[in-house]
Amino acid sequence: MAPVTSGYTRIQIILHWAIALLILFQFVGSEAIEGFVSDIGITTASSSETIPLLVRAHVIAGLLTFALMLARVSMRFLKGAPALPKDEDPKLKMAAHATHGILYLALLLTPISGALAWFGQIELADTAHLVLKTVLILFVGLHIAAALYHQFVLKNGLIKRMMKAG
């Protein structure tokens, strides 16, 4: 089990925000690759010599997201994470743990399915990638909403943990 710490390390914080920016880029630029694959099909997409820059960037960003998530998961096991507030409702704690678990899983499986679809030219992986993208969007939204709820409703300063190393 990972140790409980007083705060996240600087590296954990950098990984969090780097992955957040990559995911934002992926969502904003996803139409480029979806249109490309829709036009020529997944089985010929990765072998095409005229791959648009945004499509290449999506693939590279997905691989980078996976690599950074491996680092993030490793750091979490090695360095731990701060405990949730002691006065937090047990149901909210359970929801936080479930949300983070699903987020971590989706952030690992989405790039894997994308890589299998792109490099392996596997149609089923492409379908899984689209489903995982929806799961990821939902749980990123839930994660952001929860952070804002803690910041502006509960006013417990929880969001500061991901802003400054502790």
Image: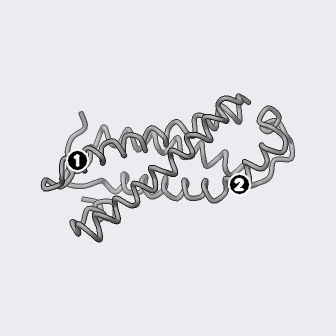
Q: Nearer the viewer, residue 68 or 134?
A: 134
Quarter of the figure that contains the N terminus: top left
Question: Image quadrant of residue 157?
Answer: bottom left
**Residue 164 appears at what percent x and percent y?**
30, 64
Q: Which mark is residue 35?
A: none
**Residue 18 appears at what percent x and percent y?**
48, 56
Residue 58, placed above or below residue 166? above
Give the label, 2 or 1, closer to the camera: 1
Question: Residue at point 53% right, 41% down?
Answer: 66
Quarter of the figure that contains the C terminus: bottom left
Q: Nearer the viewer, residue 18 or 152?
A: 152
Q: Which mark is residue 91?
A: 1
Question: Residue at point 36% right, 51% down?
Answer: 12
Q: Is residue 141 left or right of residue 159?
A: right
Residue at the disc numbered 2? 31
* Few, some or many residues within 10 Å of mark 2 (<14, 14–19, 20+): few
